[in-house]
Image: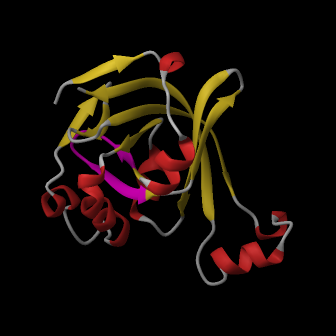
Amino acid sequence: MSFIRKNIENLEVDPFKQIGKDWFLITAGTGEHWNTMTASWGFMGVMWGAPSFICAVRTNRHTFSFIEKSEVYSICFFDEKYRSALQFCGTRSGRDCDKAKETGLTPAVIDGVPVFAEASRVFICKKRYSEMMKQEAFTTPETYEKWYGTDPLHKQYIGEIVAVYENE
């Protein structure tokens, strides 16, 4: 693992590709006790004058309890060769298996936050705001029905990106 801290102002990224097409892992907890999950929904930009990443976690996900208890979390992006590992982490629960063992991903810690040694880019995020989505807030009922008909709503987390690392 040879992560190099980068200046976020020099970061060049296509968020639509990196988030929506390439996917990422949301990881929270400690170096000894953590969980991770795959996501393909999120936002990056500026909020309250700071670079920020917004992610959403359903309340029934194992990662939910970890991110609720943590002040910080990581967002890890990977090269395409790790697609099957991300697929696994998005379809299996950490309640039932050891995701690192099953995928071959190597847990590591940067700035006290769990990450993965194979990640190509890591955002360390400090939670600044969280809120449950509400059914009555949807302005188009078809959006709610399509994505939440029988599934729990997401809780959104706005995290200030306090550090960016790239694996070189």
Residue at 28% x, 40% y: name it.
Answer: 119
What colour scheme has been applied to the protein in the rendered image? secondary structure
Above or below, 16 against 3 in this view is below
In the picture as drawn, the residue positioned furthest to the bottom comes out as 150
Above or below, 60 against 40 in this view is below
Query: As rendered, which of 38 and 121 lies closer to the eye?
Result: 121
Residue at 30% x, 52% y: name it.
Answer: 80
Determine if the magenta segment contains residue 159: no
Residue 163: x %, y % from top left = 43, 23
Residue 95: x %, y % from top left = 29, 68
The mark tally for this picture is: 0
Query: As rendered, which of 42 and 113 lies closer to the eye?
Result: 42
Residue at 59% x, 73% y: name it.
Answer: 152
Above or below, 71 against 146 in this view is above
Q: Is residue 11 left or right of residue 94?
A: right
Q: Is residue 25 left or right of residue 2?
A: right
Residue 61: x %, y % from top left = 45, 66
Q: Quadrant of the N terminus?
A: top left
Q: Which residues are magenta?
A: 25-38
Residue 125: x %, y % from top left = 48, 33
Magenta stretch: helix, strand or loop mostly: strand
Query: As rendered, which of 128 and 92 lies closer to the eye?
Result: 92
Determine if the magenta segment contains residue 37: yes
In the picture as drawn, the residue positioned furthest to the right comes out as 139
Q: Quadrant of the C terminus?
A: top left
Q: Is residue 122 left or right of residue 162?
A: left
Q: Is residue 106 left or right of residue 119?
A: left
Above or below, 133 against 140 in this view is above
Residue at 74% x, 73% y: name it.
Answer: 143
